Image (cartoon, grey):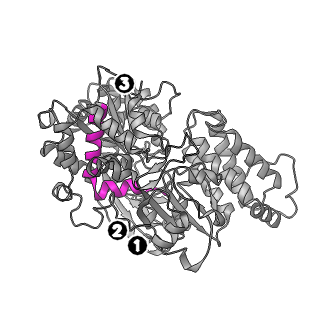
Amino acid sequence: MPAFKPVLLEAVGVPNGHLLASYKSRGGYAPLERVLAEKQPVDVVDMVKASGLRGRGGAGFSTGLKWTFLPKDHPGPIYLCVNADESEPGTFNNRILMEDDPHQVIEGIILSSFATRACTAYIYLRYEYPRSWHRLQAAIDEAYAAGYLGKNIRGTGFSLDIYLHRGAAAYICGEETGLIESLEGKRAWPRIKPPFPAIEGLFRKPTVVNNIETMACVAQIARRGVEWFKSIGVPADPNNPRDPGSYGPKLYCLSGHVEKPGCYEAPLGITARQLIDEFGGGVWKGRKAKAVIPGGISMGLMTESELDTPLDFAGPGKVGCLGLGTAAVVVIDDQTSIVDVLHNSCRFFAHESCGQCTPCREGTSWSLRMLERIKAGKGRLKDLDLLAEIGSTMGMMPGSTICGLADGAAWPIKNAINKFRSEFEDHIKRTNPTGWMVTEPVPALQIVEAH
Amino acid sequence: MIAQRKILTDEMIAQIETLASRYPTRQAVTLPALHMVHAALRQVPLEAVVEIAEVLGLAPAEVQDTLSFYQFFHQDKPHGEVRAFVCRSISCALRGGDELLEHLCHKNGVKPYGTTADGALTIEPAECLGACDFAPCILANDDLLTNMTPEAAEAELKKPRGRAT
């Protein structure tokens, strides 16, 4: 592999790298000036489509294609929502981009708004990022003062306002229609689709929702070109006409039991083992990995023997995980109980289920109660079958919920029980020697707090 | 009309009107207005809900509906001068997040979500703070406390801090 130089993270470690002057000295905003002077919106859409850029927020949908779903010749307004509600456990790449290189994000937003003819862009930022809030607001103010935002930008007739909108600590606001509802001032209950946001989204107008890292990628594609972007990553599988490939650099968030946790930029398709060994300094304390989360907790678990799986959009799915997700790689060492890991996951989803769909609200909370019981030494082998049943019946894929939160809750359950069943069985038999074989209903333990 | 507002100041009303110009509906200002009151009072009492609703042209129930969805807003009692979110999600938990929370609650004599008797500190479990590179971590008002040990966190949370924005 040729030496890879970080592009999205270029500003990290640069003194005052977050300021406009620094960004311009690295070549920033020149591509925007060029686009505004020479191009039409459709050219930018075509550029992003040709680059093969897939959304970095989790689902990996083609960004250019998403933009083309907007109605043609709509009288407007059209809105761009930038999803900065980064809440997937293990994920922090948006935070790094917003804090260390906010102008890269803003240039991407301006280019994307120009392409989609959006007149207003709202950045929905999670509450937990006060530093990002201040950095972004300062950068937006700089961009207004420099004439990159506001009315009739550079005399082109194109106008754009960017507003920051702050969330209130709810994971569901990262789901695109939950985000829209929250922005409208309501409880963040995801909407039934269709209509998709491109047709009827924010304030019932055509809306595009894109992730912060996606915006940074758009800025870099405009600066370095489609060929550059396509030279990085994993090309489309010629034997699979439905594989659009995994192009471009990606920000991997490495955390958990590694020597050097951090956000590392690498070509899409690096393996988890390479990430851990080459960037993360290996598993901490000289231990071995027992399991690795490939892309945020909702993507499930890979075993040690699956660590050579390439972390591109198609890779994790080949070993039974949900997908690449947010590329948040969390390493779990061999001294850790997988029962504890699954308990943590179930607690998270029980807390964050919005409660709108019964299978998710009940499924997440009962799976937590079962894990509480197993952890407390009152588990039964039957619980594993019950958990697996919950795991396979709640979610968009089995068709029982409105949004994908439940799929994300289900995947760690399914993966943990399929891939580590013997550890669960050993734990249950060891801690509940007289009751592990019981199959009659038993009461739940009282949990101190679940919601 | 409310004869006299008790909670929303003239400055807050002016700020709400500025924000309202950014959105096509006034309801969209609900969360920003709740944040505004919460940052000032460390709680959003019911009276404030009624006043926000009046300014935004909504029913109080609509504002309360939104408020109550987000566990974030304290309503009946203000949270402490320092509000500490202790992360318990996976990356922090793998590095001692749960133990950190337990230690801090024990040493400060509160349960999770509780406030010390002197009103100085509220300790709340948080889901992923997005600072997993610094696990385990705590968000105390606007300050991110990184790579915390139980002892270091105990000392950090005794320090006075700027208000949460």
**Amino acid tagged 2:** Lys
Q: Quadrant of the N terminus of chain A?
A: bottom left
Give the label on residue B4, or none: none
Residue A85 shown left or right of residue A388 in the figure? left
Q: Report if residue A273 lies within the magenta region.
A: no
Q: Are marks 1 and 2 in contact (CB under 8 Å)?
A: yes
Question: Mark 3 belongs to which subunit?
Answer: A
Whether discs 3 and 1 lie on one chain: the answer is: no
Q: Name the residue under label 3.
A: A205
Q: Name the residue under label 2.
A: B159
Name which quarter of the figure residue A108 lies in.
top left
Write the start and end of the magenta stretch as one range.
Answer: A90-116
Please name the residue shown 58% across and 43% down the image: A240
- Secondary element at tag 3: loop
Q: Report if residue A103 lies within the magenta region.
A: yes
Q: How crowded is mark 2: few (under 14 residues within 10 Å), some or many (20 or more)?
A: few
